């Protein structure tokens, strides 16, 4: 009887662990729209359809944003001193997830929709898009940087990641807009992070 109970507990723990992570499909890293065409199509759009992105699209989007593109673990977006300090949080109707590039998984941080709390301005854009990305400069990864350097390079490196998202969206006929008007204090409080939320970027299909 005790053996059965132990097996049941192990199964329950495994199911719980699986629920805390989403293993994304292997990202597509070949082909796609030519770079010049993507640059010609790059633009800001603030209207979104409620249509959801599938897991393959999410995997491709996050890889383009700041995924690993070399065997040495370096990324699609540059970072000062290769600090790789920009963490991407994925907000959607199911909750808040942290993108883990090395494992290509989304780790659940908060199991509820927190998009309405991200910004008092531009809130409609965030809640109407199926996915909003948040770029956070993780200061725990910036050893040896002084306060001024953390501020400067955190902002600069987030900009590189944001542009990668713009190009992915341009190449795949998706809408996106980058937002600086976010409630940083509130976000820091509910995410419990040691760093600075830099930018938010909703992504979705064009409005019908």
Image: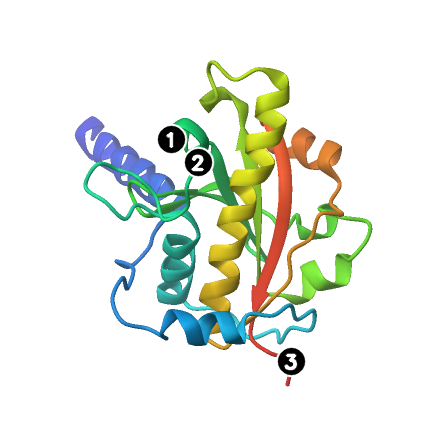
Q: Which residue sits at x=33%, y=55%?
A: 24
Residue receiving disc 3:
207
Q: Are there few (<14), some (14-19), or many (20+) residues within 10 Å of tag 2?
A: some
Q: Are there few (<14), some (14-19), or many (20+) residues within 10 Å of tag 1?
A: few
User: Is residue 111 among what the camera can see?
Assistant: no
Q: Which residue sits at x=48%, y=21%?
A: 142
**Structural distance between the alpha carbons of marks 2 and 1:** 5 Å
Locate residue 167, reporting x and y percent.
Answer: 47, 64
- Disc on the earlier residue, 3 or 2: 2
| Callout in the foreground (3, 2) | 2
Q: Element under label 1?
A: helix
Q: Looking at the image, which is closer to me, 171 or 81?
A: 81
Determine whether 133 is above or below 186 in the image.
below
Locate residue 74, reporting x and y percent.
Answer: 30, 39
Kindly indicate whether the residue at mark 1 contacts the one at mark 2 (C-beta within 8 angstroms). yes
Q: Looking at the image, which is closer to me, 112 or 28?
A: 28
Q: Element under label 3?
A: loop
- Disc on the earlier residue, 3 or 1: 1
Determine whether 88 is above or below 123 in the image.
above
Q: Quadrant of the N terminus?
A: top left
């Amino acid at each position: 009887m005790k053996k059965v109970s132990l097996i049941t507990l192990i199964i329950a723990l495994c199911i719980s662990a699986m629920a805390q992570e989403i293993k994304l499909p292997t990202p597509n890293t070949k082909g796609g729209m030519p770079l010049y065409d993507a640059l010609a199509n790059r633009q800001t759009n603030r209207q979104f359809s409620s249509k959801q992105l599938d897991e393959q699209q999410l995997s491709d989007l996050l890889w383009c944003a700041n995924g690993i593109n070399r065997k040495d673990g370096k990324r699609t977006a540059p970072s000062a001193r290769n600090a790789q300090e920009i963490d991407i949080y994925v907000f959607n109707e199911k909750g808040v997830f942290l993108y883990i590039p090395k494992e290509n998984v989304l780790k659940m941080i908060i199991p509820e929709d927190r998009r309405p709390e991200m910004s008092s301005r531009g809130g409609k854009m965030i809640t109407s898009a199926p996915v909003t990305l948040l770029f956070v400069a993780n200061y725990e990864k910036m050893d040896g940087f002084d306060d001024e350097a953390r501020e400067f390079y955190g902002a600069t490196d987030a900009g590189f990641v944001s542009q990668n998202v713009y190009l992915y969206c341009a190449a795949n006929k998706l809408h996106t807009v980058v937002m600086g008007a976010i409630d940083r204090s509130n976000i820091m409080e509910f995410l419990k992070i040691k760093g600075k939320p830099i930018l938010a970027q909703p992504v979705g299909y064009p409005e019908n």
